[in-house]
Amino acid sequence: MKDSTLRDILINYERKRDKADRALEQRKNDVYNQIPKIKEIDDEINKVGLEMMKLVLKNPAKREELCLESKNKINELQNQKQQLLNQYEVPKWYLDLQYECNMCKDRGFLANGKKCNCLKQALINESYKMSNLSRMLEKQNQSTYNDSIFSEEIDPKNGISPRQNMQLILSICDDFIYNFDKDDDRNLLFYGDTGLGKTFMSNYIAKSLLDKGYLVIYQTAFKMFEIIEEYKFRNSDNHISRNDYENLFECDLLIIDDLGTELTNSFTLSELFIILNTRLLNGKKTIISTNNKPAQLGELYSQRIFSRIFDKFQMIEFIGKDLRWENKIANMKK
């Protein structure tokens, strides 16, 4: 992501703050017009504050006494103001600044200098736009789910139909979304052939949690290892690559798509273990999607990685025929 993108996002934060200031000023004017006494009280509060500052400058030895006296006057005026606001049923929040994000007050950074989750998500959302993932999430979410596309023919191996299987998977995914805040070591591993709905259900969960304000990273295994390699070997001083790397560990949900399609070597094995192990230790949740069966994963990856996946992930199998291929044939016949 370009530095100009970050600048644009921070400029947008300035606009949000300006908008909040203007909205507050408008609400104040509305209240002043309806209840003129409120303006008189606010003016008096400002006057008391200014007079206190002047008196302290003239009599620094009496600073504490003057501050206490002014504080008492201001408290009395604020009590009068609150009584009037209550009398006219003005909501408590009406004369306060209303930020989109109360954590950082629409600045993007917390008091300790760290990025707020809203800024991290804004950066990720820009990445989504650049990769067209936002477009995919618009098409694959709770409102577009339709199990009628799945066959009702019973699969002899599993004893249920693909449609029944998807209904079970949907209930698991809904429960995962609903209980996402619980510290229950719950992670999901979607496996099965291509075109059976694994990516759809990953997007289904991603969209639901993004809409709730969680920090979600969705990457293919190939792209994830590319980010790691970029950070460790090519651009370790570049803050964008560092952020991309750190987000793999810190995001609320990491979705790794197409695990097993990447080039497997000692580097990818080590990094995969570090990511999964760190996230498990920190109580961060992960979803893995793969075309490989669990036994095949055991052959591809080291035993310690596979045991981690097997022990801490709920295995969910997708069954049936490749829907993309079926749809393609159906369209050709039209």
Image: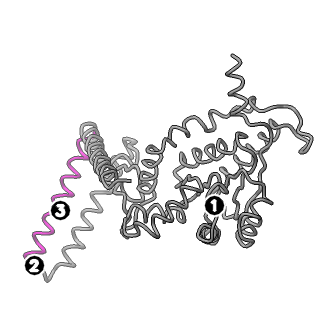
Residue 192: horizontal and vertical position, in percent? 76, 48
Magenta segment's dominant SS is: helix
Q: Is residue 246 above or below residue 102?
A: below
Q: Indicate yes or no whether the magenta region holds residue 49.
A: yes
The kind of residue tagged 1 is Lys
The kind of residue tagged 3 is Val
Real-space Cα distance between discs 3 and 2? 16 Å
Element marked by disc 1: strand
Would you name the residue on which mark 1 appears? 285
Nearer the observer: mark 3 or 1; the answer is 1
> Residue 61 falls in which quadrant of the image?
bottom left
Residue 66: horizontal and vertical position, in percent? 18, 74
Asked whether, in this view, residue 23 is left or right of residue 206, the answer is left
Element marked by disc 3: helix
- Colour scheme of the rendered structure: one colour
Q: Earlier in the sequence, mark 1 or mark 2?
A: 2
Residue 295: horizontal and vertical position, in percent? 80, 60
> Residue 111 falls in which quadrant of the image?
bottom left
Asked whether, in this view, residue 246 is left or right of residue 24, the answer is right
Which dot marks residue 48? 3
Q: Residue at x 63, y 72 (%)?
A: 281
Would you name the residue on which mark 2 appears? 59
Foreground residue among 185 and 95: 185
Residue span colored magenta: 35-59
The kind of residue tagged 2 is Asn
Real-space Cα distance between discs 3 and 1? 53 Å
